[in-house]
Structures are given as C-alpha cells and as structure tokens.
C-alpha cells in the first residue's frame, strides 16, 4: 500500500512537471495562486549494518513528496501551505501531514512576521533538509541533519520574526527569531531512538516549547556567509513503561518513567559559493539535561519509593564539504563528517562515534528531473540505532550506497 | 573536532578568501507597467536574492527568468550562477519563505509574463525591444 502511495505521488509529480514549470490558478484581477511540488524516490544499500531502513537487503523505504501553494492576497502579505509525506525506514510511512501553513506580513526589508505552522531555521539545511533537489548530496551529514528526527527539528506552531539589516561595507545581517510549540510523534525518530534496544514501551510526549534564532552574516565577500544558530527547548517531557514482572502482590509489576528536560542546541555554519564551487562547513551540538522520575507499581500500588535521577547528554557533529557544478546537468560533491554520541567520551566503543566520507554525483537531465548516485565509507555506529536489526557492532569500516531521483514542478 | 578547532578553520577560511569584483550587468531590466520604483545595483541584488520581496508600494515582486538567455546578467544581478540561483529559490519556496521565480521558455515569453503579472520583473538580453513592458534603468 505504501509503495502504491509513493508511486502515485511520484507519477503525479512527473505528470505535473512535464506539463508545465508550475501550476498557477488564476483567480482573476491579477490574483494567482502558485503551486509547486516534488517527489523523490531513493534506494539505500549497505554492507554490515542496517541504516535508515533494512539497507543490507537494499531498501526503497526512502521517499519524500510535497506540494505547496503560495498566494499574496494583499500588499506585503503572503499565505503559504505545504503538505508533505516521507518514508525513511520505519519512520514516516508516507502518512501525509501539514508541513507548514503560515501567513506572512513583511513591514519592510528589515522586519517581517510569519505565523502559523512554520519551518524552524537551523544552519544551512534545516529549513529544507527533506528537499533533495536543493543540494548535491543524497544524505546530508546525519549527525547534523538526522533524516529520522524531522518531527523534532523542522516545524513549530508559532511564529518567526525575520529580516535583513544592512551593515554598509560590512555586508548585511539576516535574522530569523522563532518561538512555538513542537509536536513530536510517538512513532517518530526521537521516540524510536529513546526506546531503541530496550523493552520500554513509549507512552507519549508532552508538547515542548521551542525558542531560538538564526543569524546569517552575509559578508562583503560575494557568496560568503557565516551563520550562528541557537535554540532552546523547554518542557521536553515523555513517558515510558517498562514491564518488570507479569506477577506481583497487587497485579503485574511495571516501572513508569517520566522524563522532564530541556535541550539547548547550537549550530555554526560557513558557506561560500564561488564560481561553480560551493564550500560548506558546519558544527552542531545539543545538550539534553533533566531528571527521570521512576515509580514502580504492582497494579496501581507503589511497591518502591519514587526515584529521581538526573539525566544529561551532549552529542556533537561537524562536517566540511565541497561541490563543483561542471555544467547544467552534472555536479559532483563530497563531504567528510564526524558524529560523537557524547562529547565527554569520544572513543572506547563502536557506538561512540560515526565518521563518514561521502562522494555524490548529481545529474540534471531536465529542469524538472534529477537523479543522484552516492557512496559512503563509514567507520563507527553511533547513529545506527535499530538495535534489533544490528545486534552485533564493531569498529570496522562499512559501505553505503544510495541512489535517488526527484521530479519537481 | 573541538569547537575551538572548528572556529579556527572558519576564521582561516575567511582570511584567505579573495575579494571578488562584481560583474557588470549585461542585460536590460524590464518590469510590469504598474511598477514605479527606481533601482540601483544593490536593490536589484536584494530582489534577486529574496531579501526584498515587495515593491515600495507593497506589491509582491514576481521574478521572471527568461530561459537561459540572460544567465550572465542574472549572475551579475544576483551574485549567483544560474544553478545556484535556482537552488537558492527552491530553498526559499519549499520552506515557505518565498515565491519561486517563474521560468519562461524564451525572451518573448518572459516579456509576455512580465506584461501579464503585476509586480513582475525580468532581466532580458541587452538590445531586446521591451514590448509591452517598462524598461528600468539600474543606477
């Protein structure tokens, strides 16, 4: 059923893309609604480990599709809506959802406001991490942009204040400040990561508040920009149930854990486009800090005192890469990235880090059609997850191959 | 890599990068008849990079790209080659932050699109007769 959905969406995008550059609905009196869309289908195969799906067998569960509409009903006002569906291994399952739906008012170049469900900024790619056609690589550096964590990282229900401040000979400063609520999926990547490798049952997220901002200094050097992002997520709460014993004095014994934490995120970026070259480097880290409260109950009767323990973790990741556009239809890119599960323990086990060297080839046979081929040599397994399908791990290197095609209009 | 090393790498890159001169605009800027604005090169660049999305009166700006017939002028105006320009706008449009430029098949189609769309702007090859649209001098 999922594959039917995928191919139907891809077919619709193909038909639309070959028919026109974009769909436009003319409302009369010079009022038009613009429609754009895309559909991507990928394939992942890997040696040794299953990553982002059942990849050792070859996985086609690597799909994205979106359609959006944009309309300017009044001066300085724009309404945009995007529906989106994706599939990354066990995450997404091509269930369509509202990616963003916002109304925007731009007072002037210096300040505007966007409200509704909006995309969060975050480095070079967070806005567009699932938009295959806007980059050379198939897989973004996963320690920075984890394809499974998009419910955590992409949209909020709230608002964004944005604008560009000229700095004279020093260039300009673009900013986006945001605040809103994050809706996390109980079947999403973060939930699966939390319970991965345990017999815990996930029992729901709260709805954390997320605030933060992205600054971009557009330097006086043509094509060079430097960015800094920080985000803070408060009331990051979730619950777990761990079966302890089916038999107890007052009924089955279960441990009920409740986590209450905050998350501080930082990202620093540098991007330089020069002639046919694009150079990029980014560093990303987040600090998760909070308390876990555990109650052990037999039936509904506590049988142990409540325990409260602190929980803290800080992963980080960085990458540096370059891409060269040879002509209208061919581009080559490469990046090297490292991810560490804990900045205080960068070695000692295969799961401590993951280092990835990627080489990508992008072909644009038509303005509305691209396809890509990509190879990765990876050491370490800190981003692997999916313990059930990766029971044994070691520090040896492994390979991953990816292919992807995208139609857009 | 520690944050300090990463910062040093970035700072080093900033120091060694060359300062590049701007390209001259080898094309003609045309706008819809209803547009009354004047532009200099910086304002034109702000439009083509999406920093400015509305004319001073508040009308939304619609960029029309004339196929590949004015790529050099487009690069001079935006600071991006045609491929980077396309990617830049796809990033804005598919994240809800902008409206993608309309792509016309040729110069005549671009002029027709500018004539038919309020607030539209295009760069066409130098020497093009701006039939049905208004030529805008870039100071």
Image: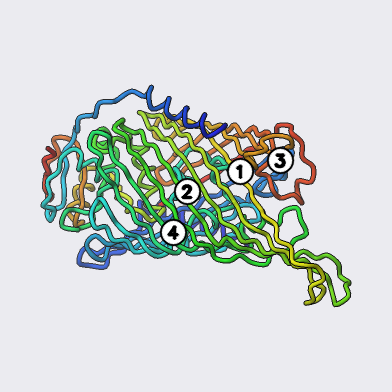
Can you name the residue that lies furthest to the front here? A305
Residue tagged 2:
A126
- Nearer the observer: mark 4 or 2; the answer is 2
| Cα–Cα span, label 4 and label 3 | 38 Å
Residue tagged 3:
A351
Q: Quadrant of residue B27?
A: top left
In front here: A328 or A210?
A210
Label 4 with label 3: CB-CB less than 8 Å: no
- Nearer the observer: mark 4 or 3; the answer is 3
Q: Mark 2 lies on which chain?
A: A
| Cα–Cα span, label 3 and label 2 | 25 Å
Image coordinates for residue A210, horizontal then vertical, percent:
48, 58
Mark 1 and mark 3 lie on one chain; the one further toward the N terminus is 1
Residue tagged 1:
A315
Horizontal side of A183 relative to B118 (left or right) equals right
Mark 1 and mark 4 lie on one chain; the one further toward the N terminus is 4
In front here: A152 or A213?
A213
Residue tagged 4:
A67
Whether residue A378 is visible to the viewer of this picture, yes or no, is yes
Q: Are marks 4 and 3 on the same chain?
A: yes
Give the answer, above or below, for where A91 lies relative to A368: below
Disc 3 residue crowd, few under 14, some 14–19, many 20+, Cα 10 Å: many
In front here: B96 or A1?
B96
Horizontal side of B26 relative to A71 (left or right) equals left
Q: Do labels 4 and 2 share a chain?
A: yes
| Cα–Cα span, label 1 and label 4 | 34 Å
Mark 2 and mark 1 lie on one chain; the one further toward the N terminus is 2
State the mark number for residue A9. Answer: none
| Cα–Cα span, label 4 and label 2 | 18 Å
Residue at the (89%, 72%) spot, across then down: A247
Mark 3 and mark 2 lie on one chain; the one further toward the N terminus is 2
Horizontal side of A169 relative to A366 (left or right) equals left
């Amino acid at each position: 059923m999922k594959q039917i959905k995928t191919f139907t969406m891809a077919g619709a995008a193909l038909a639309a893309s070959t028919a026109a550059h974009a769909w436009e609905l003319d409302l009369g009196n010079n009022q038009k609604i613009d429609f754009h869309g895309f559909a991507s289908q990928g394939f992942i195969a890997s040696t040794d480990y299953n990553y982002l799906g059942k990849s050792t067998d070859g996985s086609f569960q690597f799909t994205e599709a979106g359609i959006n509409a944009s309309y300017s009903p009044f001066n300085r006002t724009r309404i945009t809506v995007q529906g989106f569906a994706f599939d990354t291994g066990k995450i997404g399952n091509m269930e369509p959802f509202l990616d963003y739906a916002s109304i925007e008012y731009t007072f002037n170049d210096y300040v505007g406001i966007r409200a509704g469900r909006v995309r969060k900024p975050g480095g070079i790619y967070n806005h567009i991490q699932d938009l295959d056609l806007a980059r050379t690589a198939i897989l973004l550096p996963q320690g920075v942009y984890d394809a499974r964590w998009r419910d955590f990282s992409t949209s909020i229900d709230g608002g964004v204040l944005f604008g560009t401040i000229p700095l004279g000979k020093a260039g300009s400063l673009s900013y986006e400040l945001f605040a809103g609520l994050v809706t996390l999926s109980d079947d999403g990547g973060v939930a699966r990561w939390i319970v991965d490798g345990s017999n815990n049952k996930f029992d729901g997220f709260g709805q954390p508040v997320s605030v933060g901002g992205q600054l971009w200094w557009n330097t006086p050097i043509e094509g060079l920009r430097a960015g800094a992002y920080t985000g803070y997520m408060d009331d990051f709460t979730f619950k777990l149930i761990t079966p302890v014993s089916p038999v107890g004095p007052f009924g089955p014994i279960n441990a009920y854990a409740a986590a209450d934490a905050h998350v501080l995120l930082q990202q620093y970026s540098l991007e330089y486009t020069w002639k046919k070259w694009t150079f990029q480097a980014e560093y990303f880290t987040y600090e998760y800090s909070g308390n876990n409260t555990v109650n052990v109950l037999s039936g509904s009767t506590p049988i142990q005192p409540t325990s409260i323990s602190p929980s803290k973790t800080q992963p980080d990741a960085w990458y540096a890469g370059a891409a060269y556009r040879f002509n209208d239809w061919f581009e080559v890119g490469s990046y090297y990235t490292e991810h560490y599960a804990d900045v205080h323990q960068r070695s000692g086990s295969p799961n401590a880090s993951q280092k990835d060297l990627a080489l990508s080839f992008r072909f644009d046979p038509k303005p509305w059609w691209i396809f890509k081929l990509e190879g990765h040599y990876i050491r370490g397994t800190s981003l692997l997850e999916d313990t059930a399908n990766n029971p044994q791990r070691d520090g040896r290197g492994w390979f991953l191959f990816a292919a992807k095609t995208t139609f857009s209009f | 890599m520690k944050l300090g090393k990463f910062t040093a790498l970035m700072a080093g890159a900033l120091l060694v990068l060359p300062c590049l001169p701007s390209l001259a605009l080898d094309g003609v800027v045309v706008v819809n008849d209803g547009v009354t604005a004047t532009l200099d090169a910086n304002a034109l660049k702000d439009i083509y990079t999406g920093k400015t999305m509305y004319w001073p009166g508040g009308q939304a700006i619609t960029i029309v790209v004339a196929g590949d017939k004015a790529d050099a002028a487009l690069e001079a105006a935006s600071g991006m080659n045609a491929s980077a320009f396309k990617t830049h706008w796809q990033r804005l449009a598919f994240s809800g932050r902008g409206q993608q430029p309309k792509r016309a098949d040729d110069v005549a189609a671009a002029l027709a699109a500018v004539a038919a769309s309020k607030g539209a702007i295009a760069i066409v090859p130098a020497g093009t007769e701006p039939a049905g649209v208004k030529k805008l001098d870039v100071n």
